[in-house]
Image (cartoon, rainbow, N blue to C red):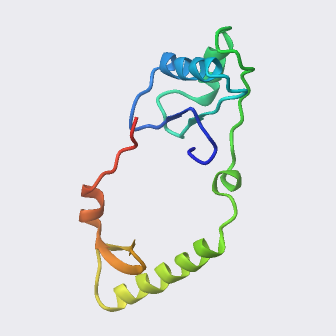
């Protein structure tokens, strides 16, 4: 969403009224943007189709409303060399941690090191998306 320049992101974790999306797109138009993107995650409180239908009824947005539902390949993109190397390193360490009897952990990147991170610790440190 950040790299794609989205104006707003809707996730299941936070209910975003359709009016808030409408306002974000209107603001983008007023600021002179030639287009705007709203990203709606699976599991959000309404579907992308429902939002598109709602927005099409608002002439103040200024943009043509088009809906694109991305498939799994489009969402992920091609992995970079760094992604592939990191995945390989994490896989090797995951097997090593298991062989050493470490369970209930996940692999984590701290600096340049792959370390075991207890799952309880990982899920207790929620990092919510900022508004």
Q: Residue at x 51, y 19 (%)?
A: 18
Q: x, y percentage for residue 23?
A: 53, 17
Front residue of this view, candidates 97 and 4? 4
Q: Is residue 43 left or right of residue 127?
A: right
Q: Is residue 119 left or right of residue 13?
A: left
User: Number of callouts in the render?
Assistant: 0
Q: Is residue 105 left or right of residue 12?
A: left
Q: x, y percentage for residue 87?
A: 54, 76
Indicate whether 84 appears above or below 28: below
Q: Residue at x 39, y 81 (%)?
A: 113
Can you name the residue that lies furthest to the front here?
31
Which quadrant is the C terminus positioned in? top left
Q: Is residue 74 left or right of residue 100?
A: right
Q: Residue at x 64, y 33 (%)?
A: 37
Which quadrant is the N terminus positioned in? top right
Indicate whether 6 appears above or below 82: above
Indicate whether 44 appears above or below 71: above
Which of the 4 quarters of the picture holds residue 13? Answer: top left
Q: x, y percentage for residue 74?
A: 70, 52
Which of the 4 quarters of the picture holds residue 31? Answer: top right
Front residue of this view, candidates 45 and 65? 65
Q: Residue at x 65, y 67 (%)?
A: 79
């Amino acid at each position: 969403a950040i790299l794609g320049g989205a104006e707003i992101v809707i996730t299941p974790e936070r209910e975003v009224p359709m009016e808030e999306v409408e306002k974000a797109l209107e603001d983008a138009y007023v600021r002179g943007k030639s287009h705007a993107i709203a990203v709606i995650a699976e599991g959000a409180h309404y579907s992308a189709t429902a939002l598109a239908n709602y927005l099409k009824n608002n002439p103040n947005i200024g943009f043509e409303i088009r809906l694109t539902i991305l498939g799994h390949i489009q969402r992920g993109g091609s992995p970079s060399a760094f992604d592939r190397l990191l995945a390989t390193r994490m896989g090797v360490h995951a097997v090593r941690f298991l062989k050493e009897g470490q369970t209930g952990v996940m692999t984590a990147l701290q600096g340049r090191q792959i370390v075991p991170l207890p799952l309880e610790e990982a899920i207790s440190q929620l990092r919510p998306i900022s508004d």
